[in-house]
Amino acid sequence: MLGSNIKYLRNRHKLSQQELSEKLGVPRSSLSDYERGHTQVGLDSLIKLADIFDVKIDDLLRSNLSHRDLEILRNKELRVLAISVDAGNNSNIELVETKAEAGYLESFADPEYIRDLPKIGFPNIPQGTYRGFEIRGDSMLPMESGSIVMCSYVENIHDIKTGKTYVIISKSEGVVYKRVKNEKNTEKLILISDNDAYLPYAINYRDIDEIWQYYAHLSFSDSKYTFNSMLEEKLQDIQKKLGEVHHAVVK
């Protein structure tokens, strides 16, 4: 790990090879060989590197220090959350697209996987840990399929508020966006679709891997048109049912 760690730390501290070689007291060509793993680093240089970058020699030799750009958040209620941070140590906003859902379910706790997800920017967002999820299907109309839901991470499952919408991650249900009812006594969430055509269903606390609370969403079509289309479909359905009732009464 030493060569890649030296290169990582040099870039992290914005030092050129020439600047670092002068601090170490070695030729620039020697430093270049260190980074490529072509030359063994002497003990004196190891000690100097540890002092320059304020790291332990053992970490230089054995750890992948690039993972310091990746953090793991743990809590007692939910599983492990992996996040990535930018050069200013601010959390990135990763985007989980529909096509990446299967991979996310397998690797949401893997820092390297999270680091490779596409990143999106969102101006003036409050402090916190956020992730974007692409929504598919019509269960949450009038929010149309293809919308990006921006969510903040929920650290404690007991903080979930009944009536609010969340993205729930679980192996059994996948990535779903629903309105929830939090039944703390039975340790279950009732997941409710805004589209009445879909029936509510329950999920146990213990089966939930991550929960993200809705903050905002990005829509890519005319929401008024979508709402009007949904309303028209409901009216047509009501008229159809009334017609069936009338037909049965006439008989």
Image (spheres, rainbow, N blue to C red):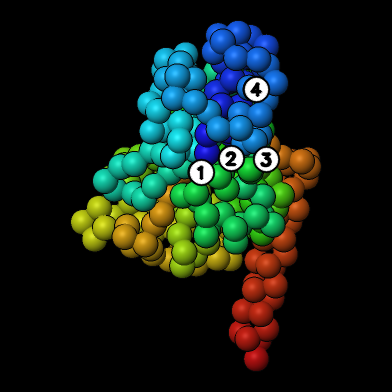
Question: Which of the 4 image quarters holds residue 13?
Answer: top right
Q: Amino acid at mark 2?
A: Arg
The residue under the point 60% across, 8% down is 22
Q: Which residue is mark 3?
A: 118
Sequence-first tag of 3 and 1: 1
- Do callouts 2 and 1 mark residues in contact (Cβ within 8 Å)? yes
> Compared to 101, does 32 lie above or below?
above
The residue under the point 62% across, 47% down is 96
The residue under the point 68% across, 25% down is 32
> Compared to 240, does 28 lie above or below?
above
**Extreme residue in the bottom direction:** 251
> 249 or 178, which lies in front?
178
> 15 or 113, which lies in front?
15
Distance between the alpha carbons at the discs numbered 2 and 3: 8 Å
Sequence-first tag of 1 and 4: 4
> 240 or 155, which lies in front?
155
Q: Nearer the viewer, mark 2 or mark 4?
A: 4
Q: Residue 70, position in %: x, y? A: 49, 35
Q: Is residue 155 left or right of residue 120?
A: left
Q: Which residue is mark 4?
A: 30
Q: Amino acid at mark 3?
A: Pro
Q: Which residue is mark 1?
A: 111
Q: Secondary structure at mark 3?
A: loop
Q: Nearer the viewer, mark 3 or mark 1?
A: 1
The residue under the point 46% across, 31% down is 60
Distance between the alpha carbons at the discs numbered 3 and 1: 14 Å
Distance between the alpha carbons at the discs numbered 2 and 4: 31 Å
Q: Amino acid at mark 4?
A: Ser
Q: Which residue is mark 2?
A: 115
